[in-house]
Image (cartoon, helix red, strand yellow):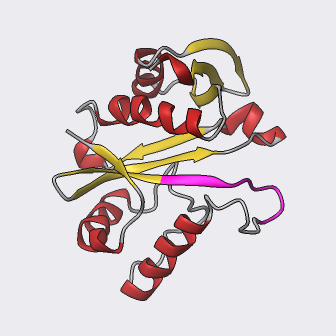
Amino acid sequence: MIELVPPSPDLYDSWLEAEDEFGDAHRDGSGFSGPRPSTDRPAYDAMVADRLSMADPSTPVPEGFVHCTFLWMVGEAEFIGYLAIRHALTPFLLEEGGHVGYSVRPSRRQEGHATRALGLSLPVAESLGIERVLVTCDDDNIGSYRTIEANGGVLEDVRNGKRRYWLDASAR
């Protein structure tokens, strides 16, 4: 069974294996954008420190970004995936990104990890003052919309090819 934990220097080897699986694919909830991240140890340690700092309201964030609590899906010391809880919604996040984003490493998909992780993220979102949590996914991403619906997500609409669901953070 997985748990959500803050990014950790101790998970480097498992994270590196997962990054090899992800390759150049986008990783929702990772905080990465653009090309594949550097995977050497100093870059990893810097990334962990950066992700941890993003939850601190006193940390400056780049224009267009919001504070974010990054959590990792971990089971038996194995890195399984990324999850991010964005503390606020920009116009873009309101339309397409939502409060929560997540990705499961390819070798561990279709095992229920995303469903459990999303459920575990709701009390964290509530503790951040987020009562209604917006989670979005591509309209054709059956696995993701089933994950959201399994956690009580109510479909508001589909915009620009994105399903937009609202979840009650206090329902858990």
Q: Nearer the viewer, residue 164 or 6?
A: 6
Q: Nearer the viewer, residue 24 or 59?
A: 59
Q: Main secondary structure of the magenta part?
A: loop
Horizontal side of residue 151 vs 77, given as left or right: right
Query: Percent position (x, y) of residue 117?
Result: 38, 36
Q: How many marks?
A: 0
Residue under the point 62% across and 19% down: 166
Q: Nearer the viewer, residue 167 or 158?
A: 167
Query: Percent position (x, y) of residue 77?
Result: 19, 59
Image quadrant containing the C terminus: top left
Query: Percent position (x, y) of residue 143?
Result: 39, 26
Residue under the point 65% across and 33% down: 130
Query: Percent position (x, y) of residue 160?
Result: 73, 28
Q: Is residue 26 visible?
A: no
Horizontal side of residue 79 vs 128, given as left or right: left
Is the residue 29 above or below the residue 33 in the image?
above
Q: Is residue 135 visible?
A: yes
Q: Quadrant of residue 137?
A: top right
Q: Residue furthest left?
A: 76
Question: Is 87 colored magenta in this rendering?
Answer: no
Question: Is 63 colored magenta in this rendering?
Answer: yes
Horizontal side of residue 148 vs 127, given as left or right: left
Residue under the point 80% across and 43% down: 90
**Range of magenta residues:** 62-70
Q: Nearer the viewer, residue 24 or 135?
A: 135
Image quadrant containing the N terminus: top left
Residue under the point 53% across and 16% down: 153
Is the residue 106 above or below the residue 43 in the image?
above
Is the residue 154 above or below the residue 18 in the image?
above
